[in-house]
Amino acid sequence: MRIPFRFRLLIFSVVLLLLVQGVNYITVASSTKKRVLETATNELVVAESVFDRFIQYRANLAATTASVSLEDFSLKKVLASSHSETKASVVDNLHYRIGTDWAMFMDIGGVVEVVSSDPPLTVGDEFPFPDMIENAEIADEGSTSGVGAINGSLHFMVLIAIDSPGTLGYFVAGYELGQAFLSDTVSQLTIGVQASLLQFPRKGIADAENLPESENLGVTVSQLDDTAVVDLWRQLDGIAASPDAVMALNLANEPMALAVLPLVPADTKQPVNIIFNYSLEKALEKSRPLFLSLIQCGLRRWRSVVRRFPQARAAYRA
């Protein structure tokens, strides 16, 4: 049976329309994904920059305020004395003046003598980061800062060596890097960016198949769910020392763009990183109205083509 020319023309027009719409859809989808990834990259780079300035500002403010106060000879005299109550008053005053979460004073052996506002260490404990003490001793300004884990929680600490003229002790002030800190940090960033703090264990992740196990994981503070955190550990283990600027990973089967920012560690053998992530899937959801409009446009074109050939079906049946 010979197919009428009008019907063949209709079929050709429909196929051509489908090809054009398919090419348009693929082009727009590819362009949208590329744009979303570029946007995510820019947002994460900005997040890194904002956080770096934020942490440096806190470190400089705490070190400068405490150093200036500790230059007072009367305060040094009190700290060199054996009056624990008077020492506690001085440490409390410095702690509230600086605005940190906690503070403490240690003797030259690194043993805690006085504490303020429930720090992670108690009187008589030994400071677990001898590298910070050594760095403060050799630094021109007599202070240093770093991030480390104490009793299962991460803290950002500023340590100042108190000279008179020889070292008479060390003042340490710190911020707890918990969920409240992450929420405060992320609130200053673009909507959609999440953050995680990871301290990798000394031996790395020994057995990824058995995760999560306390002996394999370091310290984690994250806004991600547990499954995503485990995926993050698996994929970042081994590249923490030299992370890429921005990378794309799947966390709990969700595509993410991530930026890894190494922080200055209190213990050089236990690196600490802050990871910013941006959900590519959620970003692509914002582009769905564009794809819907393309489909609607294609349907309108289809109807237009069909209406131009009202007799095609009848001709074919004839």
Image: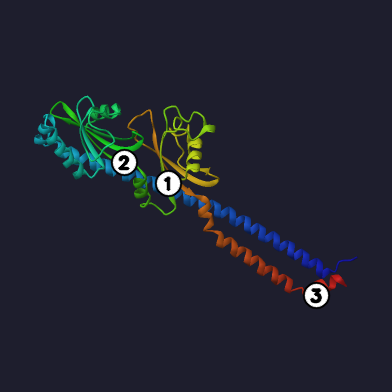
Mark drawn on residue 311: 3
Is the N terminus in the top left, top right, bottom left or bottom right quadrant? bottom right
Residue 114 position (above or below residue 22): above
Callout 3: 10 Å neighbours few (<14), some, many (20+)? few
Residue 205 position (above or below residue 190): above
Q: Position of residue 96 (x, y in %)?
A: 20, 44
Mark closer to the chain start, 1 or 3: 1
Question: Mark 2, mark 3: which one is toward the viewer?
Answer: 2
Secondary element at image label 3:
loop
Left or right placement of residue 282 versus residue 115 in this view:
right
Secondary element at image label 1:
loop
Q: How many marks?
A: 3
Question: What's under tag 2, amino acid-wise?
Answer: Glu
Cα separation between marks 2 and 3: 77 Å
Residue 283 position (above or below residue 2): above
Question: What's under tag 3, amino acid-wise?
Answer: Gln
The residue singled out by tag 2 in the image is 176
Mark closer to the chain start, 2 or 1: 2
Mark drawn on residue 223: 1
Left or right placement of residue 268 versus residue 211 in this view:
left
Q: Position of residue 281 (x, y in %)?
A: 53, 52
Cα separation between marks 2 and 1: 16 Å
Tag 1–tag 3 contact (CB < 8 Å): no
* Residue 198 visible in image: no
Q: Position of residue 148 (x, y in %)?
A: 34, 34
Callout 1: 10 Å neighbours few (<14), some, many (20+)? some
Secondary element at image label 2:
strand
**Frontmost residue, 29 versus 164:** 164
